[in-house]
Image (cartoon, helix red, strand yellow):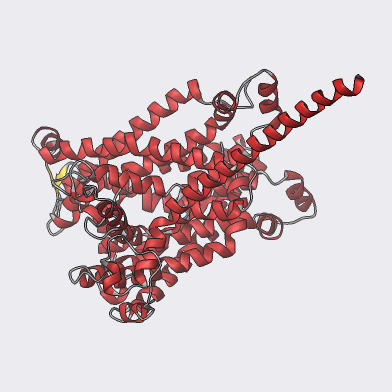
């Protein structure tokens, strides 16, 4: 076997292969131990009944069947999560892009403004949960205290079934710092000459923004959409701390329900099945976005 | 005659000129009003937190809300923080974050170098596999990892949180660093190779000094991740003396929220946020510069 490879591959090729493998060896080990094995194990667990204390017992597709046919909470969880992704990701994207475009104009104190818009990203989710719990407080939170002093009805925010999800999306729109910086970098790459050419052709500011600026930034928009979507499907900490899935399961998202099943009910098999469904959903969304990107993403390198 | 003709035309030019100047000034002013308004909205929740953390009780429950506390009650901070082992939480978090940063920097530097600065058969295939792991939600790996760490007897320690960082598990960091390494001209490495420099020497002496902004980005991202990480410690740790700030803040909450001690809660939150913001201010320029040149755009 060894002589065979040695003959077919010349020695420098083998040496460069070994060199490459040596450099990526930390990842090879990490990939095998912390990615590949866990994926395989969780695929197996999803076909079992497993409470950690006793060995997993193989039950075939029962977990999946139960999820899709009997589990009513799962249906709510699914629609809550899709709601969050479909409304939250675009909302965050629009806020980030508009703020980045504003920051891209000539202005005084730009670093100060940039820092202020970036700051919320630095706030740990746990602290963010406490701050917003207090901001959203129905009696003395800053918004409702103002609303009350104007004689208007109080806004129930996270304690209302209708407003709980939008309230969480509002917090998401507040934490767009990373996307803002990515967009800002992309906006600085929009060639002046293109904008000037459009101006000469009689395009107004809005048309230049829509037909020149946005198309050039589509690769960045794709990147932010994809990472944002993948992250949003795994939304956990704020939902867990701020609303605990309530009121009435209005904010019971995928990861919350999964965590509950795994670490509160110790249904590891059931939770693994949930994890795999989440994985497949993310794969489908990624594929759809990638597929569609051929139509709306502009790459300067291509003619 | 000529003068009379020239005069109105000049003044009309002046008028339109001053009009357009006025228009520009109005536009500028509106722009700054918009920017300041947006900045206030974005800073609002944090200012509200800071303001509450310095209030006396009657000010907290005042309608309409008070923004600038008077009198200022600074003693909220020592009173709140001493009610729980906040020092221990901070120490645990800093130790965890710094170890994780070291792990991410060391492992990702090596791996990204292998994925960008040397040619070898199969490199692109491995890189695609590496990238595709970004799509795998943590939840898929969470349960088997928990069980493995339980069997290794690593639960209730920081090993499950720290050890994986030394194996470049976060493909996002690898990707960022690789993109940056690709922007460094290959002539630099070739010259060093001709001089008989080994690959590790090239990495340490040529690539690393040039990659400081990218390393700062990854360092800060990993630091923020560790400071922020809630679900990891929640799963693996169950002794309060081991808690990082993320879990510790919850201990404050169960204590203070029942008694409606908002100033204490906000003081503890401010204390949890402040270190990250201070660090960010020091590395801000490198960080922004780094994200812009890492080719994140594509």
Where is the C terminus of chain A found, in terms of image quarters? Answer: top right
Q: Is residue A63 above or below residue B250?
A: above
Q: Position of residue A111 (x, y in %)?
A: 60, 54
Give the residue displayed 73% in from the left and 30% down from the top.
B15
Q: Position of residue B193 (x, y in %)?
A: 75, 51
Q: Is residue B155 visible?
A: no
Give the residue displayed 40% in from the left and 67% down from the top.
B68
Asked if residue B232 lies left or right of residue B7, the reply is: left
Q: Is residue B288 visible?
A: yes
Identify the residue at the far right of this view: B2
Q: Quadrant of residue A132?
A: bottom left
Give the residue displayed 54% in from the left and 60% down from the top.
B106
Near-viewer residue (B244 or A162): A162
Near-viewer residue (B268 or A124): B268
Q: Quadrant of residue B44?
A: bottom left
Q: Quadrant of residue B209?
A: bottom right
Asked if residue B225 lies left or right of residue B180, the reply is: left
Q: Position of residue B19 (x, y in %)?
A: 68, 33
């Amino acid at each position: 076997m060894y002589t065979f490879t040695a003959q077919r591959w010349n020695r420098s090729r083998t040496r460069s292969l070994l060199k490459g493998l040596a450099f990526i060896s930390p990842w090879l080990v990490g990939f095998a131990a912390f990615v590949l094995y866990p994926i395989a194990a969780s695929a197996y667990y999803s076909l079992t009944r497993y409470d950690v204390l006793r060995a997993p017992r193989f039950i075939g597709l029962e977990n999946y069947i139960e999820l899709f046919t009997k589990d009513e909470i799962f249906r709510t969880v699914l629609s809550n999560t899709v709601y969050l992704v479909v409304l939250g990701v675009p909302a965050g994207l629009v806020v980030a892009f508009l703020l980045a475009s504003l920051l891209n104009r000539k202005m005084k104190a730009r670093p100060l403004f940039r820092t202020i818009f970036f700051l919320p990203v630095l706030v740990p989710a746990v602290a963010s949960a406490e701050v917003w719990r207090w901001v959203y407080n129905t009696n003395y939170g800053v918004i409702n205290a103002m609303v009350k002093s104007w004689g208007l009805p109080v806004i129930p925010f996270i304690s209302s079934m209708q407003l709980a999800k939008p309230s969480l999306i509002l917090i998401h729109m507040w934490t767009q710092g990373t996307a803002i910086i990515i967009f800002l970098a992309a906006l600085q790459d929009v060639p002046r000459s293109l904008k000037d050419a459009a101006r000469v052709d009689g395009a107004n500011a809005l048309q230049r923004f829509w037909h020149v600026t946005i198309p050039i930034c589509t690769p960045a928009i794709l990147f932010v959409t994809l990472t944002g979507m993948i992250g949003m499907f795994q939304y956990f900490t704020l939902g867990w701390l701020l609303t605990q899935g309530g009121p009435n399961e209005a904010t019971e998202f995928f990861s919350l329900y999964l965590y509950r099943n795994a670490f509160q009910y110790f249904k590891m098999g059931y939770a693994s099945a949930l994890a795999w469904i989440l994985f497949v959903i993310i794969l489908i969304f990624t594929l759809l976005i990638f597929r569609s990107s051929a139509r709306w993403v502009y790459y300067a390198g291509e003619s | 005659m000529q003068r009379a003709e020239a005069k109105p035309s000049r003044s009309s030019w002046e008028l339109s000129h001053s009009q357009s100047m006025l228009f520009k000034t109005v536009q500028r002013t509106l722009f700054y009003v918009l920017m300041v308004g947006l900045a206030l909205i974005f800073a609002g929740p944090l200012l509200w937190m800071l303001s509450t953390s310095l209030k006396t009780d009657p000010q907290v429950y005042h309608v309409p809300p008070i923004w600038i506390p008077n009198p200022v009650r600074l003693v909220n901070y020592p009173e709140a923080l001493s009610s729980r082992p906040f020092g221990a939480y901070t120490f645990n978090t800093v130790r965890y974050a710094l170890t994780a940063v070291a792990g991410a920097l060391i492992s990702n530097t090596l791996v990204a170098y292998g994925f960008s600065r040397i040619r070898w058969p199969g490199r692109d295939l491995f890189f695609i596999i590496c990238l595709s792991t970004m799509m795998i939600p943590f939840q898929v790996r969470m349960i088997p990892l928990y069980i493995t760490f339980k069997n290794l007897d690593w639960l209730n320690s920081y090993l499950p949180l720290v050890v994986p960082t030394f194996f470049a598990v976060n493909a996002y960091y690898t990707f960022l660093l690789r993109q940056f390494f690709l922007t460094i001209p290959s002539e630099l490495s070739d010259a060093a190779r001709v001089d008989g420099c080994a690959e590790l020497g090239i990495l340490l002496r040529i690539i690393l000094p040039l990659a400081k902004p990218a390393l700062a980005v990854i360092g800060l991202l990993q630091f923020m991740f560790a400071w922020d990480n809630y679900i990891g410690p929640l799963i693996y740790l169950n002794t309060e003396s081991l808690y990082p700030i993320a879990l510790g803040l919850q201990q404050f909450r169960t204590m203070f929220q029942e008694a409606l001690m908002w100033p204490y809660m906000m003081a503890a939150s401010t204390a949890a946020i402040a270190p990250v913001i201070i660090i960010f201010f020091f590395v801000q320029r490198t960080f922004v510069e780094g994200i812009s040149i890492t080719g994140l755009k594509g």
